[in-house]
């Protein structure tokens, strides 16, 4: 599904924003601040460890919403499918969904509840009532079809188990509200999400992300691939996910090796040749274990499908899933970077040590540390990828140790200042922090299905790092004649302005050697209509300089029907900064100064003549000589006036010349370069705070 169902309704807003759509849906947004229990700092608001909601949970709770306020799709074309889930009510509930509400008895003393924007139906005063629409008569384990371009939320009905969605993995999350303690009036009625009840409501949410994964390689490196939730709750039952592995050259072969598989009866992993379907290369299930030698394709595509049919047994965890290694078999593939020489160690991530190679062999180890028991305070960061257990009283760390002295030299890193007088033992006299940097590759590949992509740390709001290089490769199946076309859009684009070095470039091919289609920066953002390509592969590169960071961008990869007219005939390029036009500014300034000097001299001569005349008459009468104070003051004032006039004239002259240069450079930008588009030729991008239409009505 590429369009959201019919009706007006709301969804919980994710950190990344409201869902991106390909129809004319525009999500309005709103927020509700709830003042929860304050008594004696006993507030017990909390949230789940995994939390993707755009919601602040502290001593109070501030929730945000995505509200669909217009219904432009015929009812028969997009009804909500049967299942067991809830959404927010806005107007009448969509057909087949039942109404209900939840009432929060918020803080009574000095209540500061507040709200803004567009909200779900409800009552928002010193307490909070929110209405819901729920599908109650379907099967949670029968996947429903919903748009998967970007992540989104539903709320589970009747149990915390999430409704299955085709091609998506759901993560269960919650918010626990500490409501008013005195004479609590919390209530719920009708059909509502699972969780609310009693003096303190707990509301459950389901966060959905697509699970069609694509991997491609440019060198002899190896990539680790892992099934969703391998290190957490395990792969959910009644779920199917797909991995597509791609090599550039048709003569190349894809090779995958499974490191471990953990599946139960009813689960299966199938490996096939081809883009979407083909001959079977292998099959893995509880009876047929994986081949330790791996699986190789007959061409440059290999498809892996993981289908979980095992029943959910109470008290038994889901199977973990699998993890494996992807590489390319080819005589022409270039050599990728290798781990440097020496014997050394790295913190072991949950995904395991780096893949073994001919030069580096990794051994593992662990260390259990019994830390302070009196008022223990061991902590970890909210984002934590280490293979370590951290408890308030102890911690257990694991390591990856390179034991063979082979490989290349270590590259140079940061050469910042260091306090050389600091001894290690001084750090151990009190609590201290150990910082680890989790390095994740930012080279992504997406194929076939429309998907969202974004700059690093866009969801967290921290902004992209300095000196960053990230790439995205988008693929559709190559056909003759052409029937599919890649379209790249940017619903949100926030790079630093003022002509800095942060830039996004789009190429019509496998890498940067291909034809440049477009380039954008903070001063020259992408057009709202996007950039269409003529090739079956598009390569997007994002580079940031060493200056301060900005929020970044949120893009969408779309697979549309091929339309040759939508492909730019010339690259969309960033206009170069105009070379200053040589003018007679210096001579102009000289003339202004000369005029000012002449004015001042004239004033001084006038005053001097006036003074001599006065002096002669006074001398004749009194016989005294001297310079009156008033005359000196007049001379000083005249000089100051002359200087002010000079400065004013110079600035006026420079302003006229600057305007003239800007006008000339604008004419040059329109008429000089006919080999590329400049941004005066394109529709300007405007960010309104709402998700814009990806396909505006014609």
Image (cartoon, rainbow, N blue to C red):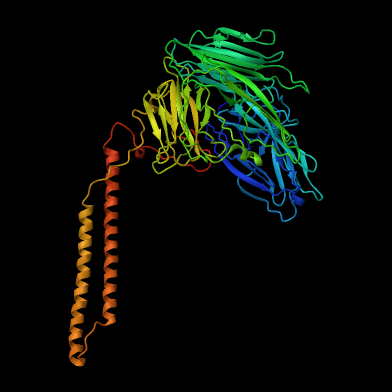
Image quadrant in which the N terminus is located: top right
Relative to residue 361, is residue 99 depicted above or below?
Answer: below
Q: Where is residue 431 in the image (x, y as percent from the top left)?
A: 66, 41
Q: Where is residue 55 in the image (x, y as percent from the top left)?
A: 64, 41
Q: Which residue is drawn at 40% across and 28% down?
A: 566
Q: Where is residue 387 in the image (x, y as percent from the top left)?
A: 64, 26
Q: Position of residue 580 (x, y in %)?
A: 27, 45
Q: Residue 369: name its quadrant.
A: top right
Whether residue 352 sits left or right of residue 443 in the image: it is right
Q: Residue at x 72, y 49 (%)?
A: 127
Q: Residue 49: name its quadrant.
A: top right
Q: Nearer the viewer, residue 138 or 450?
A: 450
Whether residue 182 sits left or right of residue 150 in the image: it is right
Residue 366 in view in this figure: yes
Q: Nearer the viewer, residue 360 or 669?
A: 360
Residue 8 in view in this figure: no
Q: Which residue lies furthest to the right in this view?
A: 183
Image quadrant in which the C terminus is located: top left
Q: How many marks?
A: 0
Relative to residue 94, is residue 185 depicted above or below?
Answer: below
């Amino acid at each position: 599904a590429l369009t959201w169902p019919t009706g007006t309704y709301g969804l919980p807003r994710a950190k990344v924003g409201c869902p991106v759509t390909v129809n004319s849906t525009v999500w309005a947004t709103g927020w509700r601040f709830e003042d929860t229990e304050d008594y004696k700092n006993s507030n017990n608001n909390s949230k789940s460890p995994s939390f993707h909601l755009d919601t602040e949970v502290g001593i109070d709770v501030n929730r945000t919403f995505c509200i669909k306020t217009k219904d432009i799709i015929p009812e028969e074309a997009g009804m909500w499918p049967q299942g067991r889930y809830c959404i927010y009510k806005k107007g009448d509930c969509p057909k087949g969904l039942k109404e209900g509400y939840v009432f929060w008895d918020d803080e009574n003393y000095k209540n500061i509840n507040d709200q803004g924007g567009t909200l779900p139906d409800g009552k928002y005063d010193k307490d909070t009532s929110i209405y819901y629409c729920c599908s109650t008569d379907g099967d949670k384990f029968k996947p429903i079809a919903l748009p998967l371009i970007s992540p989104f939320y539903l709320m589970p009905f009747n149990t915390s188990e999430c409704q299955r969605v085709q091609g998506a993995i759901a993560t269960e999350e919650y918010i626990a509200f500490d409501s008013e303690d005195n004479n609590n009036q919390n209530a719920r009625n009708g059909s509502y999400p699972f969780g609310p009840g009693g003096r303190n409501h707990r509301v459950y949410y389901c966060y959905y992300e697509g699970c069609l994964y694509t991997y491609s390689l440019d060198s002899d490196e190896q990539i680790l691939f892992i099934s969703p939730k391998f290190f957490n709750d395990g792969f959910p039952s009644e779920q199917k996910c797909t991995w597509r592995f791609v090599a550039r050259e048709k003569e190349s072969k894809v090779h995958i090796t499974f490191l471990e598989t953990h599946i139960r009866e009813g689960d299966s992993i199938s490996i096939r040749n081809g883009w979407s379907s083909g001959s079977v290369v292998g099959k893995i299930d509880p009876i047929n274990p994986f081949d330790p030698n791996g699986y190789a394709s007959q061409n440059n595509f290999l498809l892996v499908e993981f289908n979980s049919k095992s029943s959910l047994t109470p008290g038994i965890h889901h199977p973990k899933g699998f993890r494996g290694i992807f590489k390319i078999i080819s005589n022409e593939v270039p050599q990728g970077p290798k781990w440097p020489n020496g014997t050394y160690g790295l913190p072991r991530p949950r995904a395991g040590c780096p893949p073994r190679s001919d030069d580096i062999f990794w051994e593992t180890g662990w260390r259990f540390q019994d830390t302070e028991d009196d008022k223990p305070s061991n902590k970890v960061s909210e984002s934590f990828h280490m293979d370590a257990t951290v408890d308030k009283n102890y911690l257990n760390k694991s390591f990856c140790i390179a034991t063979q002295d082979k490989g290349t030299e270590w590259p140079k890193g940061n050469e910042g200042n260091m306090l050389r007088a600091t001894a290690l033992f001084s750090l151990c006299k009190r609590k201290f922090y150990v910082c680890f940097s989790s390095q994740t590759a930012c080279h992504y590949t997406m194929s076939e299905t429309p998907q969202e992509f974004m700059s690093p740390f866009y969801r967290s709001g921290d902004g992209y790092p300095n000196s960053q290089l990230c790439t995205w490769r988008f693929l559709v199946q190559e056909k003759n004649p052409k029937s599919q076309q890649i379209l790249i859009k940017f619903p949100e684009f926030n790079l630093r302005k003022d002509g800095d070095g942060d830039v996004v470039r789009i190429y019509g091919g496998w890498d940067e050697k291909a034809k440049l289609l477009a380039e954008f920066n903070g001063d020259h953002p992408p057009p709202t209509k996007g950039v269409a390509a003529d090739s079956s592969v598009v390569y997007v590169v994002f580079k940031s300089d060493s200056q301060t960071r900005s929020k970044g961008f949120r893009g969408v990869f779309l697979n549309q029907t091929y339309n040759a007219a939508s492909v730019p005939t010339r690259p969309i390029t960033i206009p170069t900064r105009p070379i200053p036009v040589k003018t007679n500014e210096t001579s102009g300034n000289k003339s202004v100064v000369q005029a000012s000097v002449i004015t001042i001299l004239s004033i001084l001569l006038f005053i001097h003549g006036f003074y001599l005349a006065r002096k002669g008459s006074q001398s004749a009468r009194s016989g005294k000589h001297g310079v009156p104070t008033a005359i000196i003051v007049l001379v000083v004032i005249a000089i100051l006036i002359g200087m002010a006039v000079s400065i004013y004239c110079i600035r006026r002259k420079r302003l006229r010349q600057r305007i003239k240069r800007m006008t000339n450079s604008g004419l040059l930008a329109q008429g000089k370069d006919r080999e590329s588009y400049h941004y005066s030729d394109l529709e300007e991008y405007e960010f309104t705070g709402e998700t814009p239409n990806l396909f505006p009505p014609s």
